[in-house]
Image (cartoon, rainbow, N blue to C red):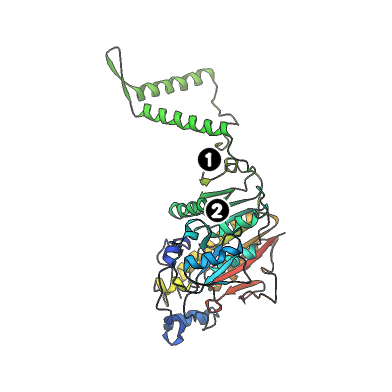
Amino acid sequence: MVMMENENTTNQENIINDEEDEQSIDNTEILFNQNNYPKEFIEFLKENQVPLDSYQVKEVPRFIRIKPSTPLSYLEKIEKQLNTKLIALNWLPNFYQLKDSKTKISSSECYKKGIIYGMDASSGAAILALDPQPGDHVLDICCAPGTKLCMTSDIIHQNSTNYGSVTGVDISSSRLGSCKTLLKKYQIPNARLFISDASNFDIKAPNHLDPIPQDKIQQRKESKKLKLQQKQQQQQPEYIENNKIVNNNNNNNNNNNNNTKEDKVTGKRKYSSKKSSKRSLFDLKELYFSNQFWMRYSNSQYYDRVIVDAECSLDASVRHLLLHSKIGVHLTPEKLIELTSLQKKLIQTGFNLLKSGGVLVYSTCSFIKEQNEFVVQWLLDNNSNAKLIPAFKENLDTPIPYSPGFIENTYRFYPKNGTSGLFISKIQKE
């Protein structure tokens, strides 16, 4: 089996960004030839009923997604800038495979201008399954590096509506930093990011989507200025009074003590007003980024759609196996139990924040049944209002390159079929 790199390794920490994606991987023959498979890897494949030829790839394919508003006539310019042909994916709109998988995209003008970004077709398939609609509020759990947020936002705002939002959650500030940069670069509207342990995230969809009012901007500036002044005063504990040095902190403490005594004498107890006990007008507790002022507020509104791209062992990712030389390394039973426990918490959190009638997509970059079908079945067994439904609309003209999972309406994308490895399922809340 394949093991996480260390105890703290997460799915997002191993995300391949555009620059890393451009590094050539010359040892794909390790996977192309089954005779090269370590004994442990063969055992892993058999144990999880994964076809032995699933990883047989002569090269690792690379894909880009082109901003939907880009005219088709611009494709030729993109090909010239990238110096390679683009092969359209008929089953996945706006996705193109690079004919030369070693092409560098980060130095191209179209990349710098935010017209294209690198995104694997299997990740695009997860959003295809999610099927966001214009005006939806969408939650992305384990959201880094942010390409799924970008694709989702493009779809929910395709009719130029200002309604609808995307909310991303991740536990790492560094990964969210990259995500924030991506959202700004591609000018994603109505977006917010939270730094939080997604297994206990509880912030619902935003209830306002208006731009920041100018008076609120001024109010925020004044609030920051006041806090700075108070901080500076605290850093100057001593002052001169009647030719004597007086400790300001002691003076404040005396005042506080006097106030306490006064309260005891009057028999009154201090209470904060109901208004002041509310969350700050400017910040939710875990808010990392928001490009709309009122999106800092949430109420009882649940999300229309949720995607949980859960932390996993990454054994389905050819790039991960090759770059990190993890072929044949064991995932201990203890680690597997710890990982699947986290995955169950993540999928339950997402389901709790989903509105009735909404849909949740659960995906992993793993082929281990305990991380996929078993987690989905656990959710169904523990939530009577959860229903597993078909993730894709069948189209014989443009078939989607998936294989069926081990329970009905679950799907596996194998590397041999031209994408990165991925498990996908779609659940509706009744």
Query: Observer-nearest residue: 401 or 19?
Result: 19
Count of number-bearing discs: 2
Sequence-wise, the earlier of marks 2 and 1 is: 2
Query: Observer-nearest residue: 36 or 124?
Result: 124
As drawn, is 106 to the left or to the right of 245? Answer: right
As drawn, is 17 to the left or to the right of 162? Answer: left
Residue 423: horizontal and vertical position, in percent? 57, 70
Q: Residue furthest bottom?
A: 35
Label for residue 248?
none
Q: What amino acid is found at the position of numbered circle 2 in the picture?
A: Gly
Query: Judging from the image, what secondary structure is the residue with disc 2 in?
Result: strand
Q: What amino acid is found at the position of numbered circle 1 in the picture?
A: Asp
Residue 296: horizontal and vertical position, in percent? 57, 42
Q: CA distance from mark 2 to mark 1?
A: 16 Å
Residue 200: horizontal and vertical position, in percent? 55, 52
Query: Judging from the image, what secondary structure is the residue with disc 1 in?
Result: loop
Residue 272 visible in the displayed image: yes
Q: Residue at x 37, y 21 (%)?
A: 251
Give the residue pinned by disc 1: 283
Query: Observer-nearest residue: 110 or 403?
Result: 110
Q: Do the CB atoms of the residues marked 2 and 1 lie less than 8 Å apart?
A: no
Give the residue pinned by disc 2: 168
